[in-house]
Image (tube, rainbow, N blue to C red):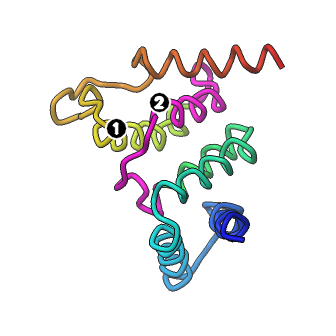
Amino acid sequence: MESSSIFQETEYLFNRAYEEELTEEQEEALYDRAHQQIIDYGWDKTFESWKAYLFKNCTTPESVINFANLFWCYCCCDYIIQDPYHFLGYMYYRIDMNTSKYDDMSILDSIATNILPKAGYPCADLMKHPLYTPEMDERLLAEVEKFKKEAKED
């Protein structure tokens, strides 16, 4: 029962357009609902649910950018993400970092430079390394390549 409920909550939070016009009250209600999901299920289970949604439902650059913007709005960069390179690698893989417009990637760059230092990767801490860019991070590039390889094998 818990499993289906968490996925239903995740679906509710992410199955909408980031650019959808909302009132301040509606935005606050969504933020509160995301925060409540974290309280109810814990961050690890919530994140796994959100990551599963991302991997299953976000297969186009537009859908990944939409997810990333919602993820940011729900303040999820405040939490530690286990294996952040795998999570980020999927998003950068799906937006095809070689051809995407930088405006699209800026949300991903913001997420990367927030979650990587929290997960123990100080190389992405812009206060210590102001020239860091995710697109040049060898670990991130390796994850992107893994996803490309997996896609070719399917």
Horizontally, is 83 left or right of 125 in the view? right
Residue 27's x, y, as percent? 52, 76
Instruction: Note whether 125 is above or below 118 in the view shown.
Output: above
Q: Amino acid at mark 1?
A: Thr
Residue 113's x, y, as percent? 34, 38
Q: CA distance from mark 1 to mark 2?
A: 11 Å
* Residue hosting label 1: 113
- Residue at 30 percent across and 25 percent down: it is 132
Disc on the earlier residue, 1 or 2: 2
* Residues at discs 1 and 2 in contact (Cβ within 8 Å): no
- Say what secondary structure mark 1 lies in: helix
Q: Amino acid at mark 2?
A: Tyr
**Foreground residue, 117 or 104?**
117
Q: Which residues are magenta?
A: 72-100
Question: Residue 43's quadrant in the figure?
Answer: bottom left
Instruction: Note whether 73 is above or below 80 in the view shown.
Output: below
Q: Which residue is situated farthest in the bottom direction here?
A: 25
Label 2 neighbourhood size at 10 Å, few (<14), some (14-19), many (20+)? many
Label 1 neighbourhood size at 10 Å, few (<14), some (14-19), many (20+)? many
Mark number, residue 56: none
Residue 67's x, y, as percent? 61, 51
* Residue hosting label 2: 85
- Residue at 74 percent across and 38 percent down: it is 59
Image quadrant in which the C terminus is located: top right
**Foreground residue, 23 or 135?**
135
Instruction: Note whether 88 is above or below 111 in the view shown.
Output: above
Based on the picture, tell me whether residue 144 belongs to the magenta stretch. Answer: no
